[in-house]
Amino acid sequence: MPSPKTLPTALLGLALACPLVADAQDMELGEVLIRDQDQSGEGQSIEDAAAQLAKVPGGTNLVDMRRPLQGRVASNQDVLAYQPGVYAQSAGNEGVKISIRGSGINRAPGAHASGLYAMLDGLPLTGPGGTPYELLEPLWLERVDIMRGANAFDRGGLALGGAIDYISHTGYDSPLLQVRYAMGSHDYRQRQISSGQVLGDFDYYLAVTDARSDGYQDHTASTSQGVIANFGYRFNPNLETRFYIRHRETDNELAGRVTKDSIEHHAQAANPAYVKGDYQRDEPGSTFIGNKTTYYIDDDSSIQTGLVYHDYPMDLREGPNRLKVAYTDVSGTFDYKRHDTLWGLDSNSTLGLRVTKHLPNDGASEFVRIPVNNTVDLAPGTRIRNFTYQGSDTVLHFSNDLEVADNLWLTTGIAAIYTRRESAVTYPEGGGKTSLHDWDYAPRLGLRYQLTPNVQLFGNLSRSVEAPHPWSMIYSSNQKFTSGVAKGAQSVPVALRNQTATTLEIGGRGDSSLGQWSLAWYYAQVRHELLSVLPDASAVTPYELNASPTVHQGVEASLTSTLWSREGVGALSLRQAYTLSDFHYRNDDQFGSNRLPGLPMHYYQGELRYDWPQGFFVAGNTQLVSKVAVDYANSYYADAYALFGASMGYNAPKGDWQTWVDVRNLTNQHYAATVTPGYDDKGVDAARSTPGEGLGVYLGVSWSLR
């Protein structure tokens, strides 16, 4: 059997070798490129959204949720499947490790994501403390826009990985009434009821969702429930507004990380310490309230403003201590867009401002939960520490698209970034405060050329900027209390520098007899990357600090092909996504040119599917992942693996109901779904990994009244 390293190449070659017939339902790239999208995005079709992304001179993805919803959609892992350049793997609950171009490579699943700017309906979700996940309910989404790397420039996303925009349903694209129910292995249950419609100039969408699961691994039971509502109103052809409300609660048991041996021989076993201590992560209720208002000044210009209030408290029982966290962000956005003719050339310009700020009460209180080590003489509930999380991000950006010749567009841009990060230990006495204030900049230069009506080539050179999280400043410190109730706990937050990167990207996308394809190569030189580093030569315990220079480079490719089609009989199609990720040090004093741990070098997903005209379908899929280094010394690796699955279902031609069966991991393969890197394990099989789900069978049904 071919290895996971060689199979992606073999399968891509098979698709290229097959005689292909264009699918009549697929849209040609030339058609996508000439259609436009209004600034608000409301009431827009999937094709119009694709047209907007196709104007970006770099790698982008669009997830049409109608496809993932023909199977289990339990988390972001299911939403972001089959997307080139996007790594999304779950530890068995909603805590998904998401990485684009190596973003957040050192993070664990379930932690606040780093290196990605997340939005809900174009409004900021990511704050100075990162991106919480509990509001990312997949059943609420119509589509997901992904802009890899600096290609998120026009939306104010300047992190290494780019941006992900989760677009909700509105009254324009949802049925009057819809009911969905799914169930399956490990007592998985998911329910939703929703309603949406357009009433003259007013429209609404409302949905209530809940889910539960015992989890594949021991001690990974989870529950969630939430509600979403949005209301839009068009005052006149030039003015419209929309209000957004999301509230959701989640509760997850934690199994912790385990060894490679445990995954191979006891895949469902949890880390014993996590079971004994009953470690859990509780999101008692996160609330997102926002507004987006668009004014069309004339046919060539518009202004859009946004305002968001986001409250997301946490109750973290992830260790012997209990951490109660208060997080509240307020964000504002402003975008001015206009079309001009300069020297007889078409010109499109965007001026934008994004501001996100923690409110003054943000911070955490730490209490004894299980007396142990330095707290062994303290009663449960004893307060250990209080500390603050403060910060803000301000991005002012200007960009221009200029058609310098027929079918050749020059993209230029410049962004000014102000970041503030602050953390202070306010209890007990003797704690310290660290405050960081940084101005930075991010230029962008890009070209896109329409070689033929169906083939586009692009290239860009850009800079990204990412500030550390306030919470990482306190937990990365090696200054600790030496006495009192907080003995052994960090006392003074550490100062960290902003992570920056300069990235070159070249690629293209198109539609041909081979199918719809995309291909991008990028090379990023990263400075001050936030990784696990020893604070000094005498230290033993690593912290998250700024590393020596690193390189992130890779290839992102996709191909969706119709292998065979006959009217009245059906069609056989193949979709594939492959990501090559080569991340390594540049002559580090200790690790030389070692690979950065935590992500696989080769990641492939493919699905072969047959559709009948009556609405029935059957599909087989595979996922191939290469081995993953688990420490920066590259002394130990998680194994490569190959997964196989199958699905079948029925989509009624009238669109009123559907049903499906989704089978995961047919061979019950034992594998490490995620790796959280260690520093130097010296070849020992340390607990760094979380096991992926074993054999699972899921089925669902939905009904709609339109």
Image (cartoon, rainbow, N blue to C red):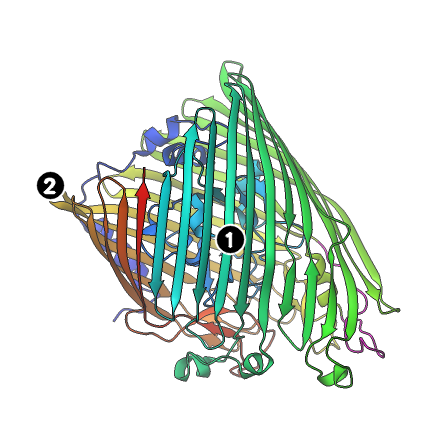
Is residue 156 in view?
no
Residue at the spot 37% in from the left edge and 76% down from the top edge: 670
Residue at the spot 30% in from the left edge and 33% down from the top edge: 28
In the image, residue 665 above or below residue 653: below
- Residue at the spot of label 2: 568
Q: Residues within 10 Å of mark 2 (few under 14, many from 20)?
A: few
Secondary structure mostly taken by the magenta-highlighted segment of the chain:
loop
Point out residue 388 in the picture as x, y percentages from the top left corner: 77, 59
The amino acid pointed to by label 1 is: Gly
The magenta segment: 478-497
In which quadrant of the rendered image does the N terminus lie?
Answer: bottom left
Instruction: Point out the residue furthest to the top here.
Output: 344
Point out residue 534 in the picture as x, y percentages from the top left corner: 69, 71
Residue at the spot 78% in from the left edge and 69% down from the top edge: 385
474 or 635: nearer the viewer: 474
Helix, strand, or loop for circle 1?
Answer: strand
Look at the numbered discs 1 and 2 and tell me whether their residues touch, using CB distance below 8 Å.
no
- Residue 519 lies in the magenta stretch: no
28 or 594: nearer the viewer: 28
- Residue at the spot of label 1: 226
